[in-house]
Image (spheres, grey):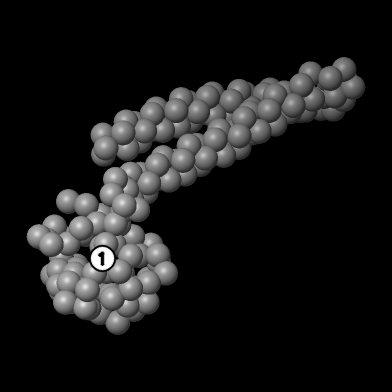
């Protein structure tokens, strides 16, 4: 089964003219009828929109134009989807790295000499600082686990997308 996408065609005659070579008025009618039979949704108003995927019927006497031979819009869509998943994964990884860097900065702040001195000087601040350090450590561990889960999920998605070829 061959596929293509609607570009700028406004009617089925224009689509047939783009897809098939050397159409006469009679073969154009045959091509349009074959397109409608293979794609009944094209009979609906507004169905000819750019990007709509169309099945190319195999009909004796209709020869695809050279531009349509070997095209694979499904493969193009799959490549676009893979790129989108990679971009999204990269975006999430950047956000996760920023959150981990923020935790490290907060942990470093707790260890600064002036902050440590202020914690010792204030009654009850020592327990609060220990609790904060523990919470930061737990968050760091949770972000590490989230990063591993993200990597595993993106790897599985990539495998699934590769299996669609």
Q: Which residue is mark 1?
A: 22
User: Which of the 4 quarters of the picture holds residue 21?
Assistant: bottom left
User: Is 51 situated above or below 146?
Assistant: below
Q: Which type of secondary structure does the marked residue at label 1 adopt? A: loop
Q: Pointer 1: residues within 10 angstroms few (<14), some, or many (20+)?
A: few
Residue at (30% x, 82% y) in the render: 45
Residue 153 placement (x, y as % from top left): 39, 32
Residue 143 placement (x, y as % from top left): 54, 29
Q: Nearer the viewer, residue 92 or 9?
A: 9
Q: Is residue 129 visible?
A: no
Q: Residue furthest left?
A: 60
| The C terminus lies in quadrant | top left
Q: Nearer the viewer, residue 146 or 31?
A: 31
| Tally of numbered tags | 1
Left or right, 164 with respect to 36, comes to right
User: Which of the 4 quarters of the picture holds residue 24?
Assistant: bottom left
Residue 130 placement (x, y as % from top left): 68, 22
Left or right, 139 with respect to 73, comes to right
Residue at (31% x, 33% y) in the render: 162
User: Is 69 situated above or below 60?
Assistant: above
User: Is 53 situated above or below 23?
Assistant: above
Left or right, 30 with respect to 123, comes to left
Q: Residue furthest bottom?
A: 45
Q: Nearer the viewer, residue 97 or 120?
A: 97
User: Which of the 4 quarters of the picture holds residue 56?
Assistant: bottom left
Residue at (36% x, 33% y) in the render: 158
Residue 89 placement (x, y as % from top left): 50, 37
Q: Is residue 31 visible?
A: yes
């Amino acid at each position: 089964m061959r596929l293509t996408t609607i570009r700028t065609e406004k009617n089925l005659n224009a689509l047939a003219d783009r897809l098939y070579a050397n159409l006469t008025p009679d073969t154009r009618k045959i091509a349009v009828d074959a397109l409608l039979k293979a794609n009944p949704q094209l009979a609906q108003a507004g169905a000819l929109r750019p990007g709509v995927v169309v099945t190319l019927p195999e009909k004796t006497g209709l020869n695809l134009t050279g531009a349509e031979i070997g095209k694979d819009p499904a493969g193009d869509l799959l490549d676009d989807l893979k790129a989108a998943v990679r971009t999204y994964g990269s975006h999430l990884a950047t956000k996760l790295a920023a959150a981990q860097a923020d935790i490290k900065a907060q942990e470093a702040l707790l260890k600064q000499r002036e902050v440590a001195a202020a914690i010792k000087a204030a009654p009850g601040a020592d327990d609060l600082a220990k609790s904060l350090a523990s919470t930061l450590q737990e968050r760091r561990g949770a972000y590490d686990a989230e990063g591993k889960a993200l990597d595993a999920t993106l790897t599985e998605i990539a495998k699934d997308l590769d299996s669609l070829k």
